Image (cartoon, grey):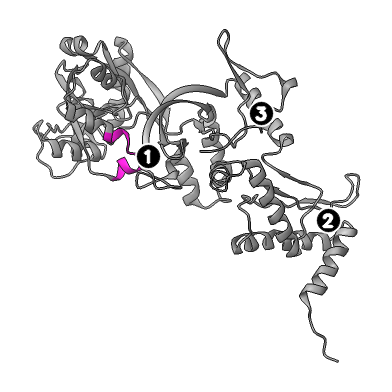
Amino acid sequence: MAQEYNPKEIESKWQRYWQEHRSFEPLALDSQKKKKYILSMFPYPSGNIHMGHVRNYCISDALARNYRQSGYNVLHPMGWDAFGMPAENAAIKHKSHPKAWTYSNIDTMRMELSSLGLSFSQEREFATSDSIYTRFEQEFFIKMWEKGLIYRKEAYLNYCPNDKTILANEQVIDGKCWRCDTPVVQKQMFQYYIKITSYAEELLSDLDILEGHWPPQVLSMQRNWIGKSKGLHFDFVLSADSIQKTGIETLSVFTTRADTIFGATYCALAPEHPIIEALLAQNHLAPHLIESIQNIRNTNARDRAQKDKIGFDLGVRVIHPLTNEEIPVWVANFVLMEYGTGAIMSVPMHDERDFEFAKTYNLPIKCVIVKDKNAKISTENIQAVADIEEGYLVNSGEFDGLSSAEAKEAIIALFEKRGIGKGVIMYRLRDWGVSRQRYWGAPIPMVHCESCGIVPEKYANLPITLPEDVVIDG
């Protein structure tokens, strides 16, 4: 007689068997079997699973079943990435509480995953919104604060006026919030930061261990992300009129091309720079400039890099430290406050970005590097493109004829001897901001005390949990 496969009957039978016999639970820790831990990415409890979930968890399920059949003691748990803005917005929409909405969805999705027969442990499960989990998150946070690896500072951040929350650069698409398409603004706010820059050199050097094990392009991308560079950090002194106008005496910059310093024809500032704040506070900028600066501020870093070069002369001048010439200071959309000092020494002949900006605004362009050591060339250069390659110095006073490598060392040494600058190592890597959500997120365990300032909560009081007697109305 032909057998008929009845999925509802057969699968229900075996699912009951697996549950009754704890088939998918790991054995006791003292088991002599080899151990295997198989963990999949936690799903966000949106309410229903979809084919993306099925595809992802069938892979880990196949691995778990294979290792069990091969004699391993397998831990194959499930968890739920339960905190976040989407849950809160959905709860507001459905006139519910985020916790009720989230845990109801977890119940639904757990049942759906179970109905697929996936071999997850049902006794080793948690949600990231469970207090047993956030308790350890909060303990880690406090320990890192005590070690100086977490700090708090004020900075301009991507802010969605509709969702009333901070966004990462990756969450800003064409200048709009990825969730609601609301135009994003740059808002000055306090935020906690994790000091990953303390590990920049260690991260960089350990990439060597991965040579031959990771794809070369991935290693190159990581090295560029960390972005180690050696250069000169120094201050331009503002002109007397500019000091009177701004109340600021110096402008700090960092350059990896000290060999091009004689080719600097202007400085460019990020729109959030303190000099611009001072000009705004003293009403030294025309209304159309204020509006333009605000528009640049409200454009995220990625979009700024892709847009045409835009800038304005601020009417501020600085003194070149070696030639004593006055150099104009501009605001420019391609300069970012979070990189370096938020100000750059612009050498248009030997930097593509500076060159494009100088051409746009008819700023001077000076050639100070040539390929041929014996070349004679005028200071002004009429090339159609920037020459960014290293070579030999010209139009650079006592440093003429030196190679770029020699000149970098010699110029840095001169600045250090005169006490007007120093050689430093910089990294492109930036500290990671902890973007706390509005309500439905792990509470940060720091007490804002009027007398003591910001102090960590006592370990004995953890976990700090969210109040549940609140009305979530948006």
Local secondary structure at mark 3: helix
Q: How many other residues sit within 10 Å of disc 3, few (<14), some (14-19) or many (≥20)?
A: many
Mark 1 = which residue? 184
Say what amino acid the circle numbered 3 marks: Gln
Mark 2 = which residue? 72
Depth-wise, is mark 2 or mark 3 nearer the camera? 3
Local secondary structure at mark 1: loop
Q: Position of residue 119 (x, y in %)?
A: 77, 59
Depth-wise, is mark 1 or mark 2 nearer the camera? 1
Q: Which residues are magenta?
A: 295-306
Q: Position of residue 311 (x, y in %)?
A: 20, 33
Residue 128: assigned label: none
Q: Earlier in the sequence, mark 1 or mark 2?
A: 2
Q: Earlier in the sequence, mark 1 or mark 3?
A: 3
The magenta stretch spans residue 143: no
Quarter of the rendering containing residue 469: top right
Quarter of the rendering containing residue 140: top right
Q: Nearer the viewer, residue 15 or 314?
A: 15
Disc 1 from disc 3: Cα separation: 30 Å
Disc 1 from disc 2: Cα separation: 51 Å
Position above or below: 38 against 427: below
Left or right of 31, for residue 392? left
Q: Residue at x 51, y 34 (%)?
A: 435
Does the magenta stretch mainly form a helix, a strand or a loop? helix
Q: Earlier in the sequence, mark 2 or mark 3?
A: 2
Say what amino acid the circle numbered 2 marks: Tyr
Q: Nearer the viewer, residue 34 or 45?
A: 45
Say what amino acid the circle numbered 1 marks: Val
